[in-house]
Amino acid sequence: MASESPKKNWSINDFEIGKPLGKGKFGRVYLARESKSKYIVALKVIFKEQIEKYRLQHQLKREMAIQTSLRHPHVLRLYGWFHDAERIFLILEYAHGGELYGELRRAGYLSEQQAATLNREIEVDFGYIASLTHALAYCHEKHVIHRDIKPENLLLDHEGRLKIADFGWSVQSTNKRHTMCGTLDYLAPEMVENKAHDYAVDNWTLGVLCYEFLYGVPPFEADSQADTFRRIMKVDLTFPSTPHVSTEAKDLILQLLVKDSAKRLPLDKILKHPWIIMNADPNGSFPE
Ligand SMILES: COCCOc1ccc2cc1OCC(=O)N(C)CCCNCc1c[nH]c3ncnc(c13)N2
C-alpha cells in the first residue's frame, strides 16, 4: 500500500475502523481498511498523553524508524503513521491469525515440529523457532536488538506464518545497552540486572520461548517477580519429565539459557542444531 503509493499525509478519515484486535501497554490495535484502495491494515492507536507521561517519545520515534526500515517475511511491516491532537496512529500489516499466545494457550503446548521448523497441517515450513531465528539474524545484521520478544508480540498471518510485532523496546545497537524494559519472564540475566547487554539477549529469549512452546509455561515462571528474578539469575532450569520433548530440544534450550551471554549458541548455529534438522521437512526443503 504505502510502499506503492507516493508518501501521503494520511489521516483517520482515510480509514474505516473495524473490530478491536487487542490492547497493549500504550494503545489499542484495530482492524482497519484504507477507504480508496480497500487495503486491509491494522491500526495501532497510541495516546500522546500516555507517551508523554512515561517520557517515551524518543523511544517511540526510534521504534517507528526501526520498524519502517525492516523488510523481512517474519517482521510485521509498519507502512507509515500519522497523528492528530491526542493520538498517534501506526499503519501496520494485518496479521489475520492474531497472537501466537492464543494458539499456545489453546493448545497448552506445541508439537516439536510446529515449535521447531515445520507445521505439518499446512505443509509449509515456517516453524516458530526457525522463523524467529531467521528474523532475529536479519534484525541483528541491521544492528537491531529486539529485547522484548514474548508470545503476545508474536503474531500469525493468514497462513500461520510468524510475524514479530512491537519493536517498542528494540534498540539500534551501537554499544552495550543499559536500559531496563519488558516483563521479566523473557529477560536475560544481564537485562534483569540492568547491566550492559547486547544482541545475545535475543538468543536467551529464543531459549525461553522454545521451552514455553514445548512445555506451555516459561522456564523461570514463579509466583512473584522477585522469585522469577532469582530463578533467572540462578538459571534455575528444570525439565518436567514429559515424553513429548526430545533430548535434542532440551539440548538446544540448554545451549541458549546460558548466563554468560558470550557462550549462548549463535543464531547461525541454531539453524544447524540437530533438533532443527531432525524436525525439518522430510522432503529435505531446509528452513528458508
Ligand atoms: C509501539 O507499538 C509498536 C507496534 O506494536 C504492535 C503492532 C501490532 C500489533 C501489536 C503491537 O504491539 C503489541 C500490542 O499492542 N498488543 C500486545 C495488543 C494488541 C495485540 N495485537 C493483535 C493483533 C492481531 N492481528 C494483528 N495484526 C497486526 N498487528 C497486531 C495484531 N498487533
Image (spheres, rainbow, N blue to C red):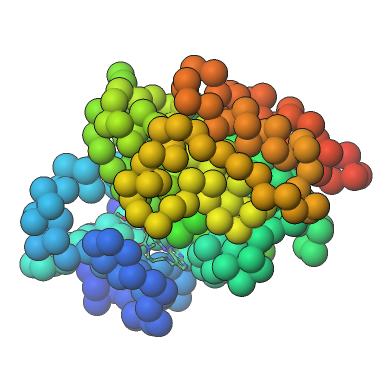
Q: x and y percent of residue 56 in the render?
A: 16, 48
Q: x and y percent of residue 65 in the render?
A: 30, 42
Residue drawn at (84%, 46%) of the image: 281
Q: x and y percent of residue 198 in the render?
A: 38, 25
Q: Is residue 73 in sight in this rendering?
A: no
Q: Is residue 258 left or right of residue 30?
A: right
Quarter of the image where the C terminus is located: top right
In depth, the one of 54 and 172 nearer the eye is 54
Question: Residue 16: which quarter of the image?
Answer: bottom left
Residue drawn at (83%, 39%) of the image: 278
Quarter of the image where the N terminus is located: bottom left
Residue drawn at (33%, 36%) of the image: 192
Residue drawn at (29%, 73%) of the image: 14
In the image, ligand 1 is in what quadrant? bottom left
Q: Is residue 18 in sight in this rendering?
A: yes
Question: Residue 146: which quarter of the image?
Answer: top left
Q: Is residue 18 left or right of residue 26?
A: right
How many labels, in total?
0
Question: Residue 131: which quarter of the image?
Answer: top right
Q: Is residue 26 left or right of residue 140?
A: left
Residue positioned most to the right: 283
Q: Is residue 85 above or below residue 6?
A: below
Q: Is residue 265 left or right of residue 172?
A: right
